[in-house]
Image: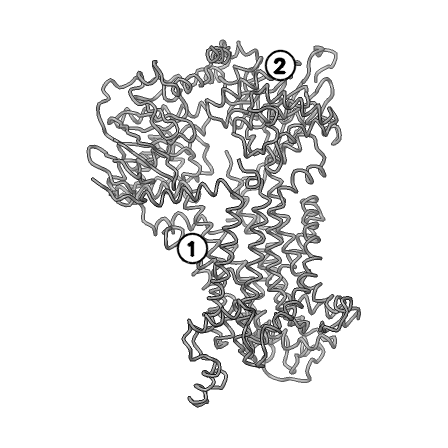
């Protein structure tokens, strides 16, 4: 483990720092945010001051407090959606790869179909018919994201199932569960972890985009995308309040991508480093 | 002991026949197959879009009139919109209409959807087309540049900037540009509202900022993918052969790398053009641009379902078409299929 | 340091104190520098052929590429000099090196299939270097290419160049690559295992073509291979390499007939194992009868029937695509046959894996060609073998550990290897672990699918000896799939020859490998290189007759 820690590059450490900062803000929002995020404290778009570190928003609420509470909301929705998407995608892809036959063909075709419509467009269609509640939002994101996880998971599992060591285990007479959990999954872990990061970054961007379009998390609950929407009219007057939550989204997604980049490099070097000794 | 055979002779001869056709006309049969798949996907997505809305819980009439509406009012509006018909009838009517270019009428405005749709699609295409014309050559050259200077500072810089760029939401890039080029240094126009009466130059000036946003958003992705595709190509054995022939770097790239890089680059471009389609939605909303994306978002907000369905189908159609075009082009440039044994 | 004055006038290539290094990146550890070639000297005269021979990791390919001043994948030439007609090519600038490659020194790689640009016609690629270096006009180059195609006995020599790489066979590609190297009329060609990836019957044709071309053009050559019998046919001198150092260097006749070093002697005498054939081969412990099998709609096995007596070895021999591995997959249930029956120890065996009982599975085990991919890279040796022990015998904890150690002792590795991962083992050790995993089931029959063909000859010998020892101790039966007649001679009791999915010949070893032969078996047997000078000429003369 010590050896591994030493080989973590600087860029990955920056990423880990950024993610930790966001997680900290989300967990301890009630204690570290200086004001109530929905309390009107002064004039709209008041300048930065020692009292209000980032200034006030379009209704005169404290931007910093809304940003901290927004971290909580955005991160919560993105994480839950990604976890559900991941569980669904991984389980279904492993089932498809191990069972083969009709199950595989059915699931794969359905997945192709869902993926033939762009994610945002699909979300817009579904959200136009469904009530815009938090649960619906999370489920829509999860299902759409699961298609991408399914495709990667199935490709990975298909590669692994075709490997001779899995064949050797099948020849021994081991059951499907043993093959999936003891032979296939451990070998697919790093790429899946990297994919989890990518999907999480995508989920953050996606929920922010939906909120920005007014179709995501509904006001007055603070979230990053919604804050951009609230404050966008200030831009033309030179008020940069809308850029603050935009910056937060950028910091989080860049951080996640830095960590993912490192994970992906590590996988490829593991594969490449396995030549003749 | 007579074990039941898994495959009877009849399907086997059929399979062999198909196999023969496939090996006799490798390119034609593959292109035909891909076209058929595209049509099937298009049809299936129309079903999905229709059912996606109709089968979901929650009834338009109730939503539209509010929970307090009388049952009589609900029934009236349902009859008026044709919602009391069975679902299959309604799908057939809808799909049949679209085949004749009729997307129905908007619930919100009562206008014919097709007119609006084609008009706005033209606007969106202008936006996406301009972005593509700038982004594709730029991204491919930057990708090549990164490969040429692999692991040296130009590569590292391009890598770092593009990693940041793929992580930025479209609206953030858009507002940054507005703050910089409209508010601080007023050179560009905002909002990017275009009218039919505008000349093409006026239009281009007006859409400069949204185009720039789309280019920035799409270019990083495309460049990274180009770089990866070329790098995997460079590690192949025939590149070593070229080096050991004493050829210069330029000749190696032009004669040996590029012909083989075509297929992966085509794929990268098509994937990103498809991505542009989605990017257009957000950018249009930011810049108040009268394109299809904004039309759709507005319709979703007021739950104007026929408009949502129409826009969704057109978006999906373009997306499917682009993916199909990419696959067919890569079949076309594959030397194995172009020159069969 | 060689004094240019003392060089014989006809010396073409002179290598002195060549040292080559690289940086290794062991997973989870800091990178460190390693030395691949540790001070090599040799001279090569014009028109002569020097054979470089050694096992994998001996540094032979690296030395060959140094003659083109090239280091593959981060390999660096760290010391010494490589002089081509007196000029140190390692001191040449970029331009000088480019003028050298493809004009004065050319390279033929092991995998011609990957070394040709798939998007260009063969002819254009063959003459590219000649045109690029301005050595001939296009017309002259095309004429020369056609001449070379004819010399290398390629079909339709005048139009062969119009084809694309995917339109010709592997053996033809290898010859086309030789033509590509010969076309600029270079002083030196480096052949890097040019026939290793080919089937034996193809190998002999390519080998003969290369030899004829070298003789006609008077080009000097470095011929790199791991197969002493092959290099003995083409080289004037041989250098035996091991771990980047010279073991022995001398004329081919001396190396083959009177080696002075133990290591060389071992290489010459490799596969000296002789296993006496069992007298009674009437038993039918495993019996396959009337097997027809398909991949999709393609029939891979046509009505194959054969059997193995208990405690004996059946060798199934054939070239790639002959269906020999498919037969093993049918026997173990991985590929259910469309028709035919399998019986084991007198009782019928279900055709599919799913329908076989654990006991049936236990009694028949399998060993793969690539031990690398046949073991889970995330499990230790102890886990890999231990799971098989638990699965079949139910042993856990200390009992399981004791059994695993016992198995490790049987394969001559020992307890120290318990916590190693496959990546930390050498090729031979991995194959031994795979054997231990099969033994853990206490099987009665083991299907061996080319278990030694990815290994160096001396290591392979060790594995064969181990298998024979285990057979003697435990009365195991083997179905041994191989393309190597020498292995068949070494270990088999009975032999089955497969060709294009059909059984060509089947019976006791003494009958199958003795005349009268059918055409295919005769060709196969005649194509296996023998450790004998002039063997190639003899075979070719016999064929022409």
For discs 2 and 1, the disc positioned in front in the rendered view: 2
Please count the marks in the image: 2
Q: Pinpoint the chain carrying mark 1.
A: A
| Side (left or right) of B331 relative to B144 | left
Callout 1: few (<14), some (14-19), or many (20+) C-alpha neighbours within 10 Å? many
The correct choice, above or below, for C265 with respect to A208 in the image is: above
| Coordinates of residue A25 in the picture (x, y in percent) | 57, 69
- Residue beneath label 1, please? A93
Mark drawn on residue A229: none
Whether A207 is drawn above or below C37: the answer is below
User: x and y percent of residue C512 in the render?
Assistant: 32, 18
Residue at the spot of label 2: C216
- In the visual, does C95 lie left or right of A93? right
Identify the chain of the residue marked 2, using the numbered disc in the image: C
Near mark 2 (Cα within 10 A), the count class, few <14, some 14-19 or many ≥20, is few
Q: Nearer the viewer, residue B216 or A270?
A: B216
Per the image, label 1 sits on a secondary structure element best described as helix
């Amino acid at each position: 483990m010590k050896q591994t820690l030493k080989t973590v590059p600087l860029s990955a450490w920056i990423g880990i720092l950024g993610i930790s900062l966001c997680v900290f803000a989300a967990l301890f929002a009630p204690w570290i945010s200086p004001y109530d995020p929905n309390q009107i404290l002064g004039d709209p778009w008041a300048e930065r001051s020692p009292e209000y570190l980032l200034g006030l928003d379009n209704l005169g609420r404290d931007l910093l407090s809304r940003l901290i509470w927004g971290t909580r909301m955005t991160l919560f929705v993105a994480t839950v959606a990604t976890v559900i998407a991941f569980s669904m995608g991984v389980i279904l892809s492993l089932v498809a790869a191990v069972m083969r036959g009709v199950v595989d063909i059915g699931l794969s075709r359905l997945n192709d179909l869902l993926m033939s419509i762009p994610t945002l467009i699909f979300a817009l269609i579904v959200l136009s018919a469904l009530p815009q509640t938090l649960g619906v939002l999370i489920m829509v994101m999860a299902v759409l994201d699961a298609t991408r996880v399914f495709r990667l998971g199935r490709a990975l599992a298909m590669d692994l199932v075709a490997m001779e060591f899995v064949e050797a285990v099948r020849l021994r007479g081991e059951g499907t569960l043993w093959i999936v959990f003891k032979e296939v999954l451990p070998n697919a872990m790093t790429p899946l972890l990297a994919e989890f990061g990518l999907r999480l970054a995508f989920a953050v961007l996606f929920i922010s985009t939906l909120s920005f379009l007014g179709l995501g998390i509904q006001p007055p609950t603070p979230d990053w995308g919604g804050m951009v929407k609230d404050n966008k009219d200030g831009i033309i007057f030179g008020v940069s309040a809308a850029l603050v939550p935009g910056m937060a989204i950028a910091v989080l997604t860049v951080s996640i991508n830095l960590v993912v980049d490192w994970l992906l490099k590590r996988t490829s070097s593991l594969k490449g480093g396995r030549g003749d000794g | 002991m007579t074990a039941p055979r898994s495959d009877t002779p009849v399907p086997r001869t059929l399979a062999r026949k198909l196999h023969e056709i496939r090996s006799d006309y490798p390119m034609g049969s593959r292109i035909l197959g891909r076209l058929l798949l595209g049509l099937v996907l298009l049809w299936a997505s129309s079903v999905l879009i229709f059912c996606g809305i109709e089968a979901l819980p929650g009834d338009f009439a109730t939503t539209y009139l509010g929970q307090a509406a009388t049952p009589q009012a609900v029934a009236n509006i349902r009859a008026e919109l044709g919602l009391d018909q069975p679902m299959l009838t309604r799908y057939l009517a809808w799909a049949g209409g679209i085949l004749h270019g009729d997307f129905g009428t908007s619930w919100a405005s009562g206008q014919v959807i097709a007119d609006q749709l084609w008009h706005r699609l033209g606007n969106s295409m202008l936006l996406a087309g301009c972005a593509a014309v700038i982004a594709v050559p730029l991204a491919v050259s930057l990708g090549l540049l990164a490969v040429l200077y692999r692991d040296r500072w130009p590569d590292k810089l391009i890598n770092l900037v593009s990693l940041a760029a793929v992580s930025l939401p479209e609206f953030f890039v858009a507002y940054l540009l507005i703050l910089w080029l409209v508010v601080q240094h007023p050179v560009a126009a905002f909002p990017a509202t275009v009218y039919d009466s505008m000349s093409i130059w006026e239009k281009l000036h007006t859409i400069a900022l949204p185009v720039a946003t789309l280019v920035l958003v799409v270019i990083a992705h495309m460049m990274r993918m180009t770089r990866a595709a070329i790098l995997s190509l460079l590690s192949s054995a025939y590149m070593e052969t070229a080096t050991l022939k004493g050829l210069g770097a330029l000749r190696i790239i032009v004669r040996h790398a590029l012909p083989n890089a075509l297929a992966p680059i085509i794929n990268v471009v098509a994937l990103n053009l498809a991505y542009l389609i989605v990017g257009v939605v957000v950018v249009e909303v930011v810049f108040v641009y009268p394109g299809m994306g904004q039309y759709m978002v507005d319709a979703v907000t007021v739950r104007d379902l026929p408009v949502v369905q129409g826009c969704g189908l057109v978006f999906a159609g373009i997306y499917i078409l682009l993916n199909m075009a990419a696959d067919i082009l890569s079949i076309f440039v594959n030397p194995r299929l172009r020159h069969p044994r | 340091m060689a004094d240019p004055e003392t060089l014989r006038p006809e010396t073409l290539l002179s290598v002195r104190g060549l040292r080559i290094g690289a940086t290794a990146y062991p997973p989870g550890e800091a990178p460190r520098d390693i030395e691949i070639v540790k001070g090599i000297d040799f001279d090569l005269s014009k028109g002569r052929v020097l054979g470089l021979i050694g096992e994998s990791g001996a540094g032979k390919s690296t030395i060959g590429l140094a003659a083109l001043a090239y280091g593959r994948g981060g390999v660096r030439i760290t010391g010494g000099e490589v002089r081509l007609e007196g000029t140190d090519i390692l001191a040449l600038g970029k331009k000088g090196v480019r003028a050298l490659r493809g004009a004065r020194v050319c390279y033929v790689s092991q995998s011609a299939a990957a070394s040709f640009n798939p998007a260009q016609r063969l002819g254009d690629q063959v003459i590219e270097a000649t045109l690029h270096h301005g050595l001939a006009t296009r017309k002259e180059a095309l004429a020369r290419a056609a001449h070379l195609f004819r010399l290398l006995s390629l079909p339709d020599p005048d139009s062969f160049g119009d084809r694309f790489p995917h339109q010709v066979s592997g053996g033809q590609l290898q010859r086309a690559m030789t033509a590509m190297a010969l076309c600029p009329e270079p002083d030196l060609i480096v052949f890097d295992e040019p026939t290793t990836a080919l089937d034996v019957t193809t190998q002999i044709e390519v080998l003969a073509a290369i030899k004829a071309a070298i003789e006609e053009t008077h080009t000097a050559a470095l011929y790199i291979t791991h197969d002493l019998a092959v290099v003995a046919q083409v080289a004037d001198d041989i250098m035996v390499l091991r771990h980047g150092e010279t073991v022995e260097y001398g004329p081919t006749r001396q190396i083959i007939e009177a080696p002075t070093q133990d290591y060389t002697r071992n290489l010459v005498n490799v596969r000296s194992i002789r296993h006496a054939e069992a007298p009674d081969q009437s038993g039918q412990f495993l019996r396959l009868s009337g097997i027809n099998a398909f991949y999709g709609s393609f029939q891979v096995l046509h009505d194959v029937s054969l059997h193995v007596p208990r405690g004996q070895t059946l060798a199934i021999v054939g070239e790639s695509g002959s269906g020999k591995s498919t037969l093993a997959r049918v026997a173990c249930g991985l590929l259910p046959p469309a028709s035919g029956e399998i019986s084991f120890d007198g009782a019928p065996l279900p055709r599919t894996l799913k329908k076989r009982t654990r006991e049936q599975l236990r009694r028949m085990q399998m060993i793969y060609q690539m031990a690398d991919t046949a073991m889970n890279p995330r499990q230790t040796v102890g886990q890999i073998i231990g799971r098989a022990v638990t699965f079949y015998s139910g042993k856990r904890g200390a009992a399981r550990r004791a059994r695993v150690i016992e198995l490790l002792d049987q394969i001559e590795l020992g307890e120290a290897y318990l916590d190693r991962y496959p990546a930390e083992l050498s090729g031979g050790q991995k194959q031994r672990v795979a054997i231990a995993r099969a033994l853990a089931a206490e099987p009665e029959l083991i299907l061996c699918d080319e278990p030694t063909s990815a290994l160096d000859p001396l290591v392979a010998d060790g594995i064969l000896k181990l298998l024979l020892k285990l057979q003697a101790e435990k009365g195991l039966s083997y179905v041994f799939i191989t393309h190597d007649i020498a292995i068949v001679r070494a270990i088999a009791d009975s032999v089955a020859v497969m060709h294009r999915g059909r059984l060509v010949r089947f019976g006791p070893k003494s009958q199958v490998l003795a005349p009268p032969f059918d055409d295919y078996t005769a060709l196969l047997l005649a194509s296996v290189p023998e450790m004998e000078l002039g063997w190639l000429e003899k075979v070719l003369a016999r064929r022409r007759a």
